[in-house]
Image: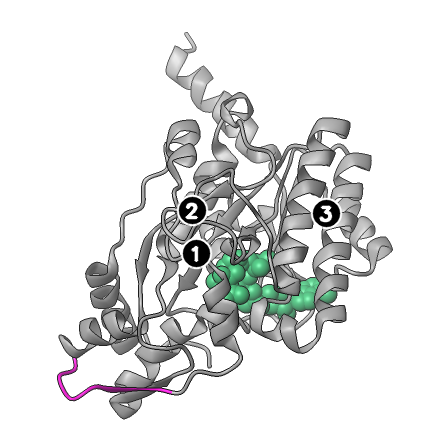
């Protein structure tokens, strides 16, 4: 006799077996870790990594990889059909600091990549799409502390403008065409596996490497510049929890506020000193200071808690300890 447990297991297996995921921008800071996490859930061969640049060495041999320019809509469409893709995670983008150096390129990549993916998702009736937004949507007129989900949003960087416009494209495709696209406003992300890609919050990753190699760091932000930050394991878990949440629980179809911790260069330096007492920090603010000053210092993510149960695990001391442990023992950080 077939047991209920067997039927349930079979049902679960069938659901999982039909998921075919394409990660675009898989060689980037988030892409590497997200691809590894998705492969552990959906099976290595069901998660296709893709990027414009070469496959990240941490991904090599762990599953399929295709070289792909997301701006080439035809080629993207061919891959979606050829690989029987049912979900897309779109991570290709130009971040805040690089974006200010080349606004046209940032606008064009950040917008066109999203429109290409949303169009194909509609045409091919994909199950789900994930596209990250950022705390960069907020501007100088947004509340600085515990910045709410719904508030004044007047971004002053091209990156922030592209993220805000992107959020409304997601909302539009969901309501107009039923595309199940989901999004998070990530804070600055701190990771040891892959390098950050040109953001204003990158100092919070660089500082760990410089502390270990030279016992000193020159910060490009002033010592009292507080920004919302998050450790990568929390960001990966948040992404997967949002994507696995039942659709009817999600009340936000632009992008959800997401919070982990908030600290300044001076505070993270103090935390690092607890591990490396000889560590010294200097401050030499550059053009990125103005970007940081336009963003909130902390975020209210209570709507994420209410809708899909979000709760961060890492604070500054726990993250610092974990970063040093892995940077000393793993030897896998890609410069
Ligand atoms: P990243 O720069 O590290 O990675 C982006 C990847 O996209 C790169 O590997 C790049 O080669 C690839 N790419 C660029 N152009 C492409 C193209 N035309 N076709 C295919 N691939 C292309 O960025 P990340 O930090 O991993 O960020 C991923 C997403 O998360 C972005 O949308 C970013 O705005 C968002 N986000 C990141 C952070 C953060 O702190 N890392 C915070 C908030 C939001
Ligand atoms: C950046 O600094 O540009 C990113 C972000 C917060 O979106 N880390």
Q: List x then y, in percent, for residue 229.
A: 38, 59
Q: What element carries label 2?
A: loop
Vertical relation: 266 (above or below) 308: below
State the residue position of label 1.
296
Q: Name the outermost residue toward the right.
A: 74
Spatial CA span between label 3 and label 1: 41 Å
Q: Which mark is residue 333?
A: none
Q: Mark 2 and mark 3 in contact? Answer it, CB < 8 Å.
A: no
Segment colored magenta:
276-283
Q: List x then y, in percent, for residue 327.
A: 30, 75
Determine whether, in the image, residue 65 is placed left or right of residue 57.
Answer: right
Q: Name the outermost residue toward the bottom.
A: 214
Vertical relation: 313 (above or below) 331: above
Q: In which quarter of the image is ligand 1?
A: bottom right
Determine whether, in the image, residue 167 is placed left or right of residue 36.
Answer: right
Q: Mark 2 and mark 1 in contact? Answer it, CB < 8 Å.
A: yes
For marks 2 and 3, give the one nearer the viewer: 2
Spatial CA span between label 2 and label 3: 41 Å
Vertical relation: 18 (above or below) 118: above
Q: List x then y, in percent, for residue 315.
A: 25, 55
Q: Earlier in the sequence, mark 3 or mark 1?
A: 3
Q: Mark 3 and mark 1 in contact? Answer it, CB < 8 Å.
A: no
Query: Image quadrant of residue 213?
Result: bottom left
Can residue 62 be seen from the camera position used here?
no
């Amino acid at each position: 006799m077939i047991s209920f447990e067997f039927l349930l297991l079979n049902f679960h297996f069938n659901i999982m077996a039909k998921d075919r995921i394409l990660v675009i921008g898989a060689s980037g800071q988030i892409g590497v870790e997200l691809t590894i996490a998705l492969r552990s859930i959906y099976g290595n061969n069901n998660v296709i990594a893709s990027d414009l640049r070469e496959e990240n060495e941490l991904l090599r041999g762990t599953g399929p990889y295709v070289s792909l320019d997301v701006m080439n809509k035809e080629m993207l469409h061919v891959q979606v059909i050829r690989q029987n893709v049912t979900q897309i995670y779109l991570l290709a983008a130009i971040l805040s600091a690089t974006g200010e150096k080349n606004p046209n390129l940032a606008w064009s990549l950040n917008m066109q990549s999203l429109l290409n993916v949303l169009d194909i998702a509609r045409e091919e009736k994909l199950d789900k799409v994930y596209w990250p937004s950022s705390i960069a949507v907020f501007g100088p007129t947004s509340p600085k502390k515990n910045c709410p989900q719904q508030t004044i949003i007047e971004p002053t960087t091209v990156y922030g403008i592209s993220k805000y416009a992107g959020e409304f494209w997601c909302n539009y495709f969901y309501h107009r065409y039923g595309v199940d696209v989901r999004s998070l406003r990530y804070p600055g992300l701190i990771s040891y596996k892959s390098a950050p890609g040109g953001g204003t919050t990158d100092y919070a990753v660089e500082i760990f490497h410089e502390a270990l190699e030279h016992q000193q760091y020159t910060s490009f932000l002033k010592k009292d510049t507080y920004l919302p930050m998050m450790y990568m394991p929390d960001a990966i878990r948040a992404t997967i929890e949002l994507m696995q949440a039942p659709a009817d629980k999600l009340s936000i179809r632009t992008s959800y506020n997401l919070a982990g911790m908030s600290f300044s260069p001076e505070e993270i330096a103090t935390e690092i000193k607890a591990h490396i007492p000889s560590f010294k920090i200097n401050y030499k603010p550059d053009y990125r200071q103005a970007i940081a000053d336009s963003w909130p210092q902390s975020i209210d993510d209570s709507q994420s808690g209410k809708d899909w149960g979000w709760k961060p695990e890492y604070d500054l001391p726990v993250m610092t300890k974990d970063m040093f442990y892995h940077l000393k023992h793993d030897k896998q950080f890609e410069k």
